[in-house]
Image: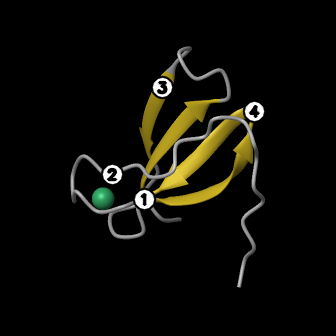
Amino acid sequence: MVEIPMVDDSSPETLRCTVCLLPMQYQSIKNEKFVWQCFKCGKQYYVSKHVDDNFEESWSPPR
Ligand SMILES: [Zn+2]
């Protein structure tokens, strides 16, 4: 069981995978970004800590 550290920045509470329309899971912080991943298709979102800044999507196939 991984405990999700609560960051009291304005991290979004839920993101939805644009493919599956399922709620995504918060994974970790990487390169100053919140990493969210869809548990179903593996799609990842990188959400900048600076909210209005940028929002990236990436798709990481399972290795
Ligand atoms: Zn998905």
Marked residue nearer the N-terminal end (1 or 3) = 1
Kind of residue sitting beneath label 3: Phe
Q: Which mark is residue 43?
A: none
For disc 3, the marked residue is 55
- The quarter of the rendered structure image containing the N terminus is bottom right
Kind of residue sitting beneath label 4: Asn
Instruction: Provide residue 53's location: percent of width, then percent of height.
Output: 56, 14
Kind of residue sitting beneath label 1: Met
Q: Residue at x 47, y 42 (%)?
A: 45
Q: Given contact means CB atoms under 8 Å apart, are the residues at marks 2 and 1 in contact?
A: yes
User: Which mark is nearer the camera, 2 or 4?
Assistant: 2
Q: Is mark 4 within 8 Å of ligand 1?
A: no
User: Which mark is nearer the camera, 4 or 3?
Assistant: 3
**Quarter of the figure with residue 26:** bottom right
Instruction: Provide residue 55's location: percent of width, then percent of height.
Output: 48, 26
Q: Residue at x 72, y 36 (%)?
A: 9
For disc 4, the marked residue is 31
Instruction: Provide residue 12's location: percent of width, then percent of height.
Output: 52, 42
For disc 2, the marked residue is 16
Q: Is mark 1 within 8 Å of ligand 1?
A: yes
Marked residue nearer the N-terminal end (1 or 4) = 1
User: Furthest-top residue in view?
Assistant: 53
